[in-house]
Image (tube, rainbow, N blue to C red):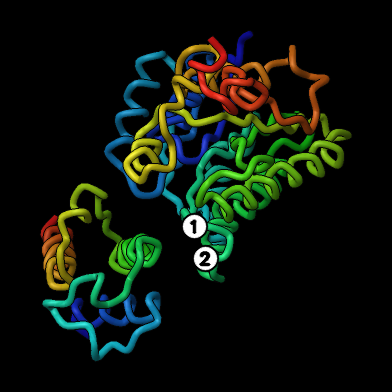
């Protein structure tokens, strides 16, 4: 399963929404994810991929796609180390 | 007050109050286990500053909101050290909501980190203190007894934490373990900036009879005292560090009126 799909499933589970509404362009507001959902999603993604996402970076995510791109980059960096 | 040779675990000690407590205990000679979850750089900075004080330090990443991760953290401590002298339950989180907006998710998240984690960590710690005694101090807040805006579930979790403390204090007393909490009013930390931005905290400095905000070091000083033998007869209490805010007239009518 792709990183994108894994993150989509995590967010859908936490925010109680259908996966199909989450596209790369979706904002957290459109997904109806509140601040607690976002924190829980960050925690779940950090644990799923064994990475750390600093708050300063997370605050820059304006869409689901930004979140996915960041995680993909971190996972790739981890693989290279 | 010397803590030389003691081993202390401070949960959530990369930043803010936890960092100040870790540094204070280290300055009195304790070796420190730093627990963090989401801010590795801050934890590493705290470790570096602690090592500069001439004591040993260990960093353990663990989400204390997850009982499995708590088990893993204490397994690591057991394997590496085999004992513990001091536990500081400092890690905290919470959903800022009014009581009618508290849903199951917000309740579970906040209670898991602020209350359940303190119970589970204390149980693990008490086993590692067997035969040697120890100190357990948890960080609570005035919101356990006062009603603060959008603080419902956090306040409730802190009330539970204080109740856990009282039960532990009595039931662990025969094992020579002293258990207490320290309650602070709004403390000048990174976390507080969020509340100020959200308009939940306003001008605490003006409302404080002592004339300034409570600092993390103010809280750390009291925690360190409770970890000393001088505090041996204090059991199951909540020591308030608020510059007089909770009992002062200023918090009700404002500074100008009093003057």
Q: Is residue B167 above or below residue B4?
A: below
Q: Residues within 10 Å of mark 1 (few under 14, many from 20)?
A: some
Chain letter of disc 1 in the image: B
- State if disc 2 and disc 1 touch (CB < 8 Å): yes
Give whichever of B154, B28 is nearer the camera: B154
- Judged left or right of residue B48, residue B84 is right
Residue drawn at point x = 43 percent, y = 42 percent: B200
Residue located beneath label 1 in the image:
B97
- Judged left or right of residue B148, residue A38 is left
Which element carries disc 2, helix, strand or loop?
helix
Residue drawn at point x = 41 percent, y = 14 percent: B54
Residue located beneath label 2 in the image:
B101
Q: Is residue B71 visible?
A: no
- Asked if badges 1 and 2 are on one and the same chain, I answer yes
Q: Quadrant of the N terminus of chain B?
A: top right
Give whichever of B148, A22 is nearer the camera: B148
Q: CA distance from mark 1 to mark 2?
A: 6 Å
Q: Is residue B138 above or below residue B256?
A: below
Across and down, in percent, residue B18 comes to 47, 32
How many marks the image carries: the answer is: 2
Give whichever of B16, B142 is nearer the camera: B142
Give whichever of B92, B117 is nearer the camera: B92
Residue drawn at point x = 53 percent, y = 17 percent: B257
Which element carries disc 1, helix, strand or loop?
loop
Q: Is residue B234 visible?
A: yes
Chain letter of disc 2 in the image: B
Where residue A25 sits, quadrant-wise, is: bottom left
Across and down, in percent, residue A45 comes to 31, 67
Where residue A13 sits, quadrant-wise, is: bottom left
Across and down, in percent, residue B231 comes to 75, 17
């Amino acid at each position: 399963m792709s990183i994108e799909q894994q993150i989509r499933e995590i967010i859908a589970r936490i925010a109680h929404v259908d996966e199909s509404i989450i596209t790369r362009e979706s904002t957290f507001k459109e997904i109806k994810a509140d601040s607690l959902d976002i924190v829980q999603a960050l925690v779940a993604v950090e644990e799923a991929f064994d990475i750390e996402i600093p708050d300063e970076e997370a605050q820059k995510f304006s869409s689901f796609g930004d979140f996915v791109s960041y995680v993909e980059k971190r996972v790739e960096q981890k693989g290279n180390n | 007050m010397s803590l030389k040779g003691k081993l202390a675990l401070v949960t959530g000690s990369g930043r803010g109050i936890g960092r100040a407590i870790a540094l204070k205990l280290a300055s009195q000679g304790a070796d420190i286990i730093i627990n963090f979850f989401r801010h590795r750089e801050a934890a590493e900075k705290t470790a570096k500053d602690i090592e500069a004080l001439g004591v040993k330090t260990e960093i353990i990443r663990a989400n204390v909101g997850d009982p499995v991760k708590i088990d893993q953290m204490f397994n690591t401590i057991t394997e590496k050290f085999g004992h513990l002298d001091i536990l500081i339950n400092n890690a905290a989180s919470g959903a800022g909501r009014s009581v009618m907006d508290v849903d199951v998710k917000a309740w579970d998240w906040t209670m898991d980190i602020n209350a359940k984690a303190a119970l589970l960590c204390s149980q693990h710690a008490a086993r590692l203190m067997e035969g040697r005694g120890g100190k357990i101090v948890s960080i609570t807040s005035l919101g356990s007894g006062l009603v603060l805006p959008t603080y419902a579930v956090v306040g409730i979790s802190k009330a539970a934490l204080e109740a856990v403390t009282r039960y532990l204090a009595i039931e662990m007393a025969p094992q020579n373990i002293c258990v207490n909490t320290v309650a602070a009013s709004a403390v000048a930390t990174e976390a507080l900036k969020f509340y100020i931005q959200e308009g939940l905290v306003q001008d605490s400095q003006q409302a404080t009879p002592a004339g300034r905000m409570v600092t993390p070091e103010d809280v750390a000083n009291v925690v360190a005292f409770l970890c000393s033998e001088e505090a041996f007869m204090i059991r199951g209490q909540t020591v308030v560090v608020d510059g007089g805010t909770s009992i002062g007239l200023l918090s009700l009518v404002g500074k100008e009126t009093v003057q």
